[in-house]
Amino acid sequence: MRDRHAGRVVRGLCGVTLLELLVVLTVLGVVLGITGLAFAALRAPRGGERALEIKQVRAEAIRAGAPRTTQHARFLPDGRAIGPGVDPLTGAPLAK
């Protein structure tokens, strides 16, 4: 194309302006921030008092070499659990 007034050839501009770059970076920052918060919310919640009690009693049964009992289960000296509220092998509380 020729510019009629100056007789010069006008070429198509290539590249990215600083404003466009800042807008893209801002949008990416917002999206990454929101997804980071979403992933943090997916993390399993910390155990409550019941889970803490179960872990402590299991550790005590292993350390003492004798069975220990809580409201939720009985732990054998090898760490296995007997009861409805715990995993028999790990002693971890079962989800309700």
Image: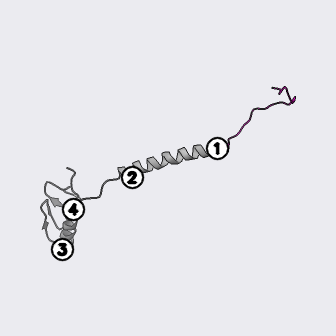
Give the foreground label among 1 and 4.
1
**Of marks 1 and 3, which one's residue comes earlier in the chain?**
1
Which residue is drawn at the image coordinates 35% and 53% (left, top)? Answer: 43
Cα distance in 3D space between marks 1 and 2? 32 Å
Residue 49, which numbered label? 4
Q: Position of residue 74 (x, y in %)?
A: 13, 62
Q: Find disc 2 in the rendering and name its residue.
A: 40
Residue 1, which numbered label? none
In the rendered view, would you say 72 is above or below 29?
below
- Give the magenta range: 1-17
Residue 64, which numbered label? 3
Which residue is drawn at the image coordinates 14% and 60% (left, top)? Answer: 73
Which residue is drawn at the image coordinates 18% and 69% (left, top)? Answer: 61
In the rendered view, would you say 11 is above or below 61?
above
**Of marks 4 and 2, which one's residue comes earlier in the chain?**
2
Tag 2, which secondary structure? helix
Q: In front: 50, or 7?
A: 7
Left/right placement of residue 79 relative to residue 10 reads left
